[in-house]
Amino acid sequence: FQMDTTPESYLDLFPLDAIVYLTPDSENVLEDISPDKVYVLGGLVDESIHKQLTLQRAREQCLQTARLPIREYMVKAHNSRNYHSETLAINQVFDILCTYYETRNWPVALKAGVSSGKGYVLREVAEE
């Protein structure tokens, strides 16, 4: 993959209808990756998780939103802390998207990118 960086805002570089802002708070599930779209990883440099903040930011910018299909392919695993989070680090989301783009397989991509510490496992593993 080639990655370019620029100080310019994605809002100035791409048409609004081409931008999909990825946030775990979106109601829309990312079902596939389109070469016609620009995906913005909604990330915060912060130790605490602010619910709905990335979704609010996307709405303020009138952008389409989507979330990774974690709920569709994974289930909450029993763990001692009873901890479950769909909020991932930017590098994890990037790895999931890259793996999905190469394999076109969400279970493979999610298994590779969602660490066990998030409290989720693939649905098939949980059913065995």
Image (tube, rainbow, N blue to C red):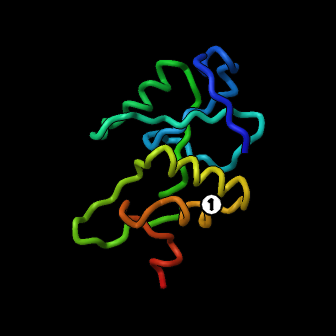
- Asked which quadrant contains residue 85, the reply is bottom left
Percent coordinates x, y for residue 118 in the rendering: 37, 60
Residue displayed at 77% across by 39% down: 35
Q: Is residue 9 above or below residue 104?
A: above
Percent coordinates x, y for residue 98 in the rendering: 65, 52
Q: Quadrant of the N terminus?
A: top right
Task: Give, as a three-letter code, the residue at label 1.
Answer: Trp
- Asked which quadrant contains residue 46, the reply is top left
Q: Secondary structure at mark 1?
A: helix
Q: Is residue 127 above or below residue 72?
A: below
Q: Residues within 10 Å of mark 1 (few under 14, many from 20)?
A: many
Q: Nearer the viewer, residue 4 or 64?
A: 4
Residue furthest bottom in the image: 128
Residue 31 falls left or right of residue 34? left
Residue displayed at 37% across by 34% down: 45
Q: Nearer the viewer, residue 78 or 96?
A: 96
Q: Is residue 38 above or below residue 91?
A: above
Residue displayed at 43% across by 40% down: 25
Residue on which disc 1 sits: 106
Percent coordinates x, y for residue 100 in the rendering: 66, 56
